[in-house]
Amino acid sequence: MESLKELYRVGPGPSSSHTLAIQHACLYFIKQYPNIDEVVVDLFGSLSLTGKGHRTDKIIEETFRNANKTVEVRFQNDWNVKHPNTLVIKDVHSDTSLTIYSVGGGAIRVEGVEQVVNPYVYPHHSFADIVQFCNEKNLSLYEYVTYFEPEIDSFLSEILDQMLKTVEQGLHSEGMLPGLLNMQRVANDIYKKAEVALDSAEKKTLLLTAYAYACAEENADGKTVVTAPTLGSCGVIPAVMSYYYHVCKVDKKRLQEALAVGGIFGNLIKTNATISGAEGGCQAEIGAACAMAAAACSYIENLSFEQIGYAAEIGIEHHLGLTCDPVGGYVMIPCIERNGVAALRAMDAMLYAKHIGSIKPNKITFDMVVQTMKYTGKKLALELKETSLGGLALVMPIHHE
Ligand code: SF4
């Protein structure tokens, strides 16, 4: 598995695959061909169908404009490509071109270029193998991460700080989100309701929801967020981190360790299935985020390896088959609400693992459910994998000019 630095990335919203990775792709082209000043970018597959709502054209124009280059973006409604998120950047005046795939979580692969593929720093590919290794070496799951990435703490500290900062900024922002959906920011209003809620369970639900909305609304507004593991699902982990930090007063070091543990599960999903909505539907984004958050909460609560694996398994199992059908191609409906729901579900998954996991062993393991997610993602119809051709996007059609 790759470094956690390839999983948690800081960048502009609203989509890791449709903005963050695309920005990297454009910068990569500019670096390779600094003397090319006029390009055409063709977007294929999901990038073409949801690129308008995801602001893909905007990030391409901005990136080339900042490098003093001119660019024309073309939406090619064509699926005859190797990957559902493909873009081709071409020089207008020669045959020079690069075909680049946005493979999920902000990562890119360049056709014919091996060096962009990052080396694996973790030798294990299943949770079962990781647990066995930890037991042999007497390591906790956090120590497992530092065993292979001894320098990771400062990185995790930056990631945690950015998550908490994004939530804070989202809580203090009001007004309308960009685009044609006329969506208002509501995190601040939810937070105010949480503050005056008398019932403690209601207060907890509203607080977690406000934190998740704050982050997801910042993302929808194109602000700086962290892929966790994607930008569409960026509010789930920061919501539980904010809750443990502000309400439970858990210190930042422990939260960083929890991020590392959640990262193991994100990495396993990324390696053995996918974290791309265009490849696997929303189970691959929100399901993955919920699993990671559930594992992180379970680590904070001092649960056993088995219980942490159980919590992560629940996070995916009950999102299996979840479709990706963003209305108008915007990362707003169902995405923002879905982040709130998944944050609550992550906390519940931890509680199930804590209590039910101590009564009976779970029969479906985390590794088994990841394989099921991969299978289910393949079976999902194209209309339900970040194309905005079906589902909610169909019942609420939005016409971009
Ligand atoms: S529906 Fe899920 S996978 Fe699709 S854009 Fe929204 S958060 Fe991402």
Image (cartoon, grey):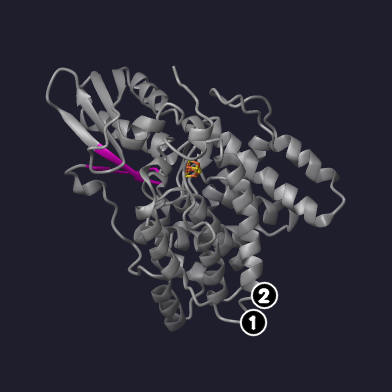
| Residue identifier under label 1 | 359
| Percent of width and height locating residue 198 | 87, 50
Residue at the image position 24 percent from the left and 31 percent from the top: 88
**Left/right of residue 31 with respect to residue 150 in the rendered view:** left
Give the secondary structure at mark 1. Answer: loop
**Left/right of residue 182 with respect to residue 29 in the rendered view:** right
Q: CA distance from mark 2 to mark 1?
A: 7 Å
| Percent of width and height locating residue 355 | 67, 75
Q: Which residues are magenta?
A: 100-110
Q: Quadrant of residue 65?
A: top left
The crowding category of the residue bearing disc 2, from other C-alpha atoms within 10 Å (few below 14, some 14 to 19, many at least 20), is few
Residue at the image position 73 percent from the left and 48 percent from the top: 207
Quarter occupied by the C terminus: top left
Residue 149 is at least partly visible in this image: no
Any mark on residue 355, and which? 2
Is 102 included in the stretch rendered in magenta?
Answer: yes
**Left/right of residue 349 with respect to residue 225 in the rendered view:** right
Number of residue marks = 2
Indicate if the residue with disc 1 has its beta carbon within 8 Å of ligand 1.
Answer: no
Residue at the image position 66 percent from the left and 50 percent from the top: 242
Is 92 included in the stretch rendered in magenta?
Answer: no
| Percent of width and height locating residue 91 | 19, 22
Query: Tags 2 and 1 in contact by the CB under 8 Å rule?
Result: yes
